[in-house]
Image (tube, grey):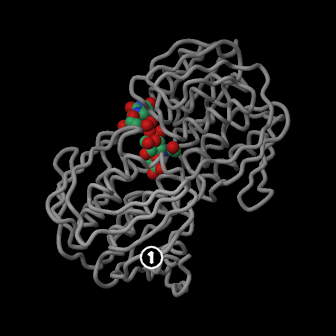
Amino acid sequence: MHFTITGGTKLRGSVSVNGAKNSALAIISAAALAQDGATYLENVPLYTDILDLCEILRALGAEVTFVDRRVLKIEAKNITNCVAPYEKARKLRGSTYIVGLLLARMGKAEVAMPGGCDIGARPIDFHLKGFEALGARAWLEHGSILAEAPGGLRGTDLFIDRASFGATINLMIAASLGHGTTHLENAAREPEIVDLANFLTGLGATVRGAGTSTIRIEGSRRLHGVRHEIIPDRLEAGTYLLAGLASGGEVEVKGVIPEHLATVCAKLVEVGADLEMGPDSIRLKSPQTLAAVDVQTQPHPGFPTDLHPPIVAALARANGISLVQETVFENRFNYVNELVRMGASVRVDRDTAIVRGQPRLSGAPVEAPDIRGGAALVIAALAAEGQTTVSGVQYVERGYEDLEGKLCQLGAEVSRDGHALASEGQAS
Ligand code: EPU
């Protein structure tokens, strides 16, 4: 599968963003904690990882159905199976949350080691250490994570070695059902963690401090279904803002929570963009020439690692040299060689991309290595002269729904697998 993109058009118009993928993966898993009633999740994005996670829950015994296009109903009173289907679970990173879920619900779990984007070693030792601290035994065997807590999990104080997003989610899920109080120290602070905390509170657990590095969770012996709306995807929003910037255009992202993008907006202003913030929208007007800036990725509230490749693509045409340092994942530079094919001057020195801005980029056949690396190539293609084909669209589509449709709505010339989409007059 590939995108064909003819660059050179300044993007103009508005796009709405979907529910946050990384929030939805956590909350769908957590929904199966409820022994009573049904959960209705609104604003669920329709990615393959989400659909695979739904399949896994069904295989465990939950009833999972889309009752509307973006409304997912989950009823999990009959969880009967402790083994997640191996081939499904190995495909996505979010499947690790099934271990936390099953330990809490069943006292036992067997889930394949997760897959996901190839951006570093991505071990799961913090998850396992956390489960052990909660009173479980957890180990790796035959390609799977195995865990058991025959006497149930018990609340405890535990320190996560590094503010890992996934470990924080998993331990919040595990600690919410059962007894005792858990303090998670050095917890991740992403908005998706706060979304999960609100959801767990709705289920009947007591969760305090989410959004800070200390989270307190009082487990409840019984949890019940609830209705919840997934927060908007700040990473999708950031990607469209950077695409608008790289193209020299003027775009508005709608349906966002602007505070979630504070650090990203600070960088956009630093490169020279004009921003207009609404209560749930951000409008960006590009400068004539982008200023070079330095960026360092950090866990939230720092600059998000997931927007590192997209901002490098935008800075490829800045006036001067930008340094983009990646501190979260050790191998997030797989997209760089492809960007260089398009005329970008990017050199990687250890954990830093040195980006020497060029006056022009030129279209080329390139291949997306992962979700965000693929988004970077699409952004570069929009800014490049001539035609680019981006293959490996299946990776990009793990994090962006209808990317070509939304870009066409902004006036871009993009088609998927040779099917042109109408681009004229659709900007709203
Ligand atoms: N780490 C460990 N041990 C662990 C867990 C993490 O050493 O047990 C290390 C990782 O190797 C990494 C760092 O800690 O170097 C941070 O990893 P983290 O656990 O925070 O990331 P994750 O949970 O694996 C999620 C998102 C990623 C996003 C990161 C950072 C999901 C499914 N994935 O991954 O999303 O980049 O948090 O915010 O939620 C994407 O959306 O494109 C994506 C890759």
Q: Nearer the viewer, residue 189 or 150?
A: 189
Q: Position of residue 18 (x, y in %)?
A: 59, 58
Q: Nearer the viewer, residue 370 or 241?
A: 241
Q: Is residue 113 left or right of residue 363?
A: right
Q: Position of residue 281 (x, y in %)?
A: 52, 59
| Amino acid identity at mark 1 | Arg
Q: Quadrant of ligand 1?
A: top left
Numbered disc 1: secondary structure: strand
In the picture of the structure, the residue carrying the numbered disc 1 is 12
Q: Residue at coordinates 53% horizontally, 50% vertically from top-left?
A: 257
Residue 123 in view of the camera: no
Above or below, comparing residue 332 to residue 97 in the picture? below
Q: Residue at coordinates 55% horizontally, 31% vertically from top-left?
A: 145
Q: Position of residue 225 (x, y in %)?
A: 79, 36
Q: Position of residue 103 (x, y in %)?
A: 66, 25
Quarter containing the C terminus: bottom right
Above or below, comparing residue 418 to residue 391 in the picture? below
Residue 166 in view of the camera: yes
Q: Nearer the viewer, residue 87 or 275?
A: 275
Q: Is residue 296 left or right of residue 157?
A: left
Residue 23 picture quarter: top right
Q: Is residue 282 left or right of residue 310?
A: right
Q: Nearer the viewer, residue 405 or 210?
A: 210
